[in-house]
Each structure stands twice: as structure tokens, then as C-alpha cells.
Image: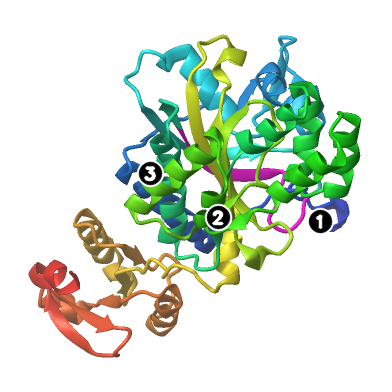
């Protein structure tokens, strides 16, 4: 009686215990999803290495000051920031450019230049989760530290373009601008850099009706205001630059020329891409995947200056970050998924007496680089055949007493249904 009461209490406790859910804005990934993610990650890594970039890694958490110096104190509201047990202000990294530049200032300043770096990792932002936007997300990016010339910027834009092309995405565009064009026009009108920053932020977000009163307040007349607005609407073929002049325009022409030499022609000029943050210094670019709707940007970058903020010398830097999750979502929207990695062989013992023999065969095949699995559930041969088919295995290897007596196994091709007796000494060659 007491045992029955105890069992009932245990069942009631289990029913009352709430299921622990994952935190909002995070995800779990199935083996199939991880296979797709690793496939794209590996493809990006190989492309970066083909372009001469080397991989770095930085801590997932940093001193909060690293990010407030870069983006201002308001960014704390968007971060997972906290005080650790030693009283230090720490934050989970919201992006990877600042940690990379901190790493450069700390340890890499004596490396030969250009210094070409790439990275991949998790980032964290406390914001409202929505399609393609999560609180824990993944970023793939690259930075080039070297000389301020068009070929440096073209090199990183070319890498980003080749990575997205190699992924298989077909519907995307690459828009390139130069922040110096609009900054120059505002400066000519007497707008100070401090007053220019909020104006550029509005222009970058295409909030033209909000930008106009700010320009008026900064002292621009109606003609100058409309000239600035008109400049943001210069979007299209790089040939449009031939109608304009100036140092920034000449630099842009140089970037497009190098990209053309690389064979990258699916690019357009967009002088409305400006970025309102002070540390951007010249070229700015964005990549969009229209199939994602409003949240269509999958990559952004440009040239910037951050090292002096972190206690180092001022150096030219240019780079980009690709939204890994959004790129995957865009590929999914286009119906592009990589072929699943298939199991070469699934080994089935026909009886308990053959299990040890089956395990020995599995070990031998795995040592030869053949992807192999084995029955661990002690199913019947028929059920094992169905299970092997569900795994997408190419072959089933049946280990039975009759086969063992002939030092052989039965190999069945699951695609054709054909099966034959194969000597153990020839099994590896048969499967390869």
C-alpha cells in the first residue's frame, strides 16, 4: 500500500513540475539543421582562406566598455551586460568587429600588413525576436588592416560577394557607397561633424522627412537640403558616377574598377548607404536578399577607424559581417538545401552470437574512413533494413552464421535492392 502511495506521489510531482523551456530568442538545432549550418560555415571558411584570410577567435564576453566606446552608452540597453563576481562590468559580445580590433591592439600590431582576418561565432543582443533576428545569433565576418586605398576595400567586398555567390543564393544585390560624399556636402553647407551624425543616421535609414528638419536646424538652405536628398537617391550602375566629381567619387570609381578586374560585376552604386556612426571613414556597402522582406540585409561593412579608441595607433581598417542566420533563411526561402551527408554502411547482425563479429567489422570500416553505423537496439533484420533506409544509408551489411562460415558478409545496395556475398578481405574496396 505504501509503495502504491509513493508511486502516485511521484506521478503527481512529475505532472506538476513545469517543463523547462529554452530562453526566449534562442534556438535548438537538430542534427539535420546542424549539418546544413556546418556545411555553409565550412564553405565560408574555405572561401576566406582562398582569399588569403586567416581565422581568429575572441572571448564570448568582454569588458562592457569595449562596446560603449565603439557605439555609445545607449548600446547597453541592447546588450546582455552585467557585473561579475569581481565587480567588473562585463557584456556578452553583441558583434565581433570591436573584439577583433581589441585583439589587434593587444597582440597583433607587429604582424605584417595587410593583416587579413576572419572569424565566426555567437553574438548576443537583447532585442525583440522576429523572423531572422534572434537574441543569440551567429556572425561570420572579416577584417583587413592595411593601406587606405581602393584595392583594400575591393578585396573585402570581393570576399563577401564570393562567399554569398558560393553559397548558391541567386536573388541578392550588393550596394556600395562612400560616406565621404554626403559628409562633404554637409560640411560645405557649414554643418559640424557633431550635427552631421544624427542627420546621416536618418539618411541611412531613408527617413528623409525626419532628416530635412535636422538639416534645416543645422543651417542648410532648401536648395542644399534637396541636393543632399537627391544624392541619397543615386542608385544604379557604377556608370552613374561619371556624372559626378570629387575625391570620394574617384575613390568609389577605383573600387568598382578593381571589382571589375576580379570579375565581380553584380554590384551597384548607392550613395544613400552612409552609416551614421562616426567611426566609419569611407566606403560603406550592404548586401540584401529581397526574399527576406523588410529584414532583407544579410551583410554590411565598410572602412572604419576604431583602434585609437582602444588605446592603439590609428590604422586603416575595412571589413564586413554576414548575418549567418539570415543567409540560411534566404537560402531556405529559395529552396536551396545541401544534400544530406549519407551513411556508407549500416551493419546488421542476424543473431546475438554475431554481435561481436558485427562490431569488429564496424571498427575496421571506420578505421578505413567509411561512415558506418550498427544496430544498437537489437531489432529484427527486417526492422533494421527499414531503419537503415530512414537514415539514407547506401548499403546494409548483414552478418550471419552462414556468411561468417565463409569469412564473408552479405552487402545489400538499398537503392537498387541488389545484394551479393562479399569476402571480408574485399569489403572495403566494395564499399569505396
Mark 3 and mark 2: Cα distance apart in space: 31 Å
Instruction: Judge the density around disc 1: few (<14), some (14-19), many (≥20) Cα neighbours within 10 Å.
Output: few
Residue 87 is situated, as x and y percent measured from the top left of the image, at 75, 10
Please tell me whether mark 1 sits on a helix, a strand or a loop: helix
Mark 1 and mark 3: Cα distance apart in space: 59 Å
The residue to which callout 3 is attached is 48
- Which mark, by number, is residue 7? 1
Residue 200 is situated, as x and y percent measured from the top left of the image, at 75, 36
Residue 40 is situated, as x and y percent measured from the top left of the image, at 45, 56
Q: Is residue 46 left or right of residue 12?
A: left
Q: Nearer the viewer, residue 13 or 125?
A: 125
Q: Is residue 135 left or right of residue 262?
A: right
Q: Nearer the viewer, residue 93 or 235?
A: 235
Which residue lies at the image location 12% right of the left edge and 69% below the top edge? 429
Judge whether residue 135 is colored magenta: yes
Please say whether residue 69 is visible from this viewpoint.
yes
Residue 221 is situated, as x and y percent measured from the top left of the image, at 86, 36
Span shown in magenta: 129-143
Which residue lies at the image location 84% right of the left edge and 33% below the top edge? 220
Please tell me whether mark 2 sits on a helix, a strand or a loop: helix
Mark 2 and mark 1: Cα distance apart in space: 79 Å
Q: Is residue 67 left or right of residue 19?
A: left
Judge whether residue 140 is colored magenta: yes
State the colouring used for the structure image. rainbow
Which residue lies at the image location 26% right of the left edge and 83% below the top edge? 412
Instruction: Judge the density around disc 2: few (<14), some (14-19), many (≥20) Cα neighbours within 10 Å.
Output: few
Q: Does 334 sit above or below residue 134?
A: below
The residue to which callout 2 is attached is 240
| Residue 110, image quadrant | top left
Amino acid at each position: 500500500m505504501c509503495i502504491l502511495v509513493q508511486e502516485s506521489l511521484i506521478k503527481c510531482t512529475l505532472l506538476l513540475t513545469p517543463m523547462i523551456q529554452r530562453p526566449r530568442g534562442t534556438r535548438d538545432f537538430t542534427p539535420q539543421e546542424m549539418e546544413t549550418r556546418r556545411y555553409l560555415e565550412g564553405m565560408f571558411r574555405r572561401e576566406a582562406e582562398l582569399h588569403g584570410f586567416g581565422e581568429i577567435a575572441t572571448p564570448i564576453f568582454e569588458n562592457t566598455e569595449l562596446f560603449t566606446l565603439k557605439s555609445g552608452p545607449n548600446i547597453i540597453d541592447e546588450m546582455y551586460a552585467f557585473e561579475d563576481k569581481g565587480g567588473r562590468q562585463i557584456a556578452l559580445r553583441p558583434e565581433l568587429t570591436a573584439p577583433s580590433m581589441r585583439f589587434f591592439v593587444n597582440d597583433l600590431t607587429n604582424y605584417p600588413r595587410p593583416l587579413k582576418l576572419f572569424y565566426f561565432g555567437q553574438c548576443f543582443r537583447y532585442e525583440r525576436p522576429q523572423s531572422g533576428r534572434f537574441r543569440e545569433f551567429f556572425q561570420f565576418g572579416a577584417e583587413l588592416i592595411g593601406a587606405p586605398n581602393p584595392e583594400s576595400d575591393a578585396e573585402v567586398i570581393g570576399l563577401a560577394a564570393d562567399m554569398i555567390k558560393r553559397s548558391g543564393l541567386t536573388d541578392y544585390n550588393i550596394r556600395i557607397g562612400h560616406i565621404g560624399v554626403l559628409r562633404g556636402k554637409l560640411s560645405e553647407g557649414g554643418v559640424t561633424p557633431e550635427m552631421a551624425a544624427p542627420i546621416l543616421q536618418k539618411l541611412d535609414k531613408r527617413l528623409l522627412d525626419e532628416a530635412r528638419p535636422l538639416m534645416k536646424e543645422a543651417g542648410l538652405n532648401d536648395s542644399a537640403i534637396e541636393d543632399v536628398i537627391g544624392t541619397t537617391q543615386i542608385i544604379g550602375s557604377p556608370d552613374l558616377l561619371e556624372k559626378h566629381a570629387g575625391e570620394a567619387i574617384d575613390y568609389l570609381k577605383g573600387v568598382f574598377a578593381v571589382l571589375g578586374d576580379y570579375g565581380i560585376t553584380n554590384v551597384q552604386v548607392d550613395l544613400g548607404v552612409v552609416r551614421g556612426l562616426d567611426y566609419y571613414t569611407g566606403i560603406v556597402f550592404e548586401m540584401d536578399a529581397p526574399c527576406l522582406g523588410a529584414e532583407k540585409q544579410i551583410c554590411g561593412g565598410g572602412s572604419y577607424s576604431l583602434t585609437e579608441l582602444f588605446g592603439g595607433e590609428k590604422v586603416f581598417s575595412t571589413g564586413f559581417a554576414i548575418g549567418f542566420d539570415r543567409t540560411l533563411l534566404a537560402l531556405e526561402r529559395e529552396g536551396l538545401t545541401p544534400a544530406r551527408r549519407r551513411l556508407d554502411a549500416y551493419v546488421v547482425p542476424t543473431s546475438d552470437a554475431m554481435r561481436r563479429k558485427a562490431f569488429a567489422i564496424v571498427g575496421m570500416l571506420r578505421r578505413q574512413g567509411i561512415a558506418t553505423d550498427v544496430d544498437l537496439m537489437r531489432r529484427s533484420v527486417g526492422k533494421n533494413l527499414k531503419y537503415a533506409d530512414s537514415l539514407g544509408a547506401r548499403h546494409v551489411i548483414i552478418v550471419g552464421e552462414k556468411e561468417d562460415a565463409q569469412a564473408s558478409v552479405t552487402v545489400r545496395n538499398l537503392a537498387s535492392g541488389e545484394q551479393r556475398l562479399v569476402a571480408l578481405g574485399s569489403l572495403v574496396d566494395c564499399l569505396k
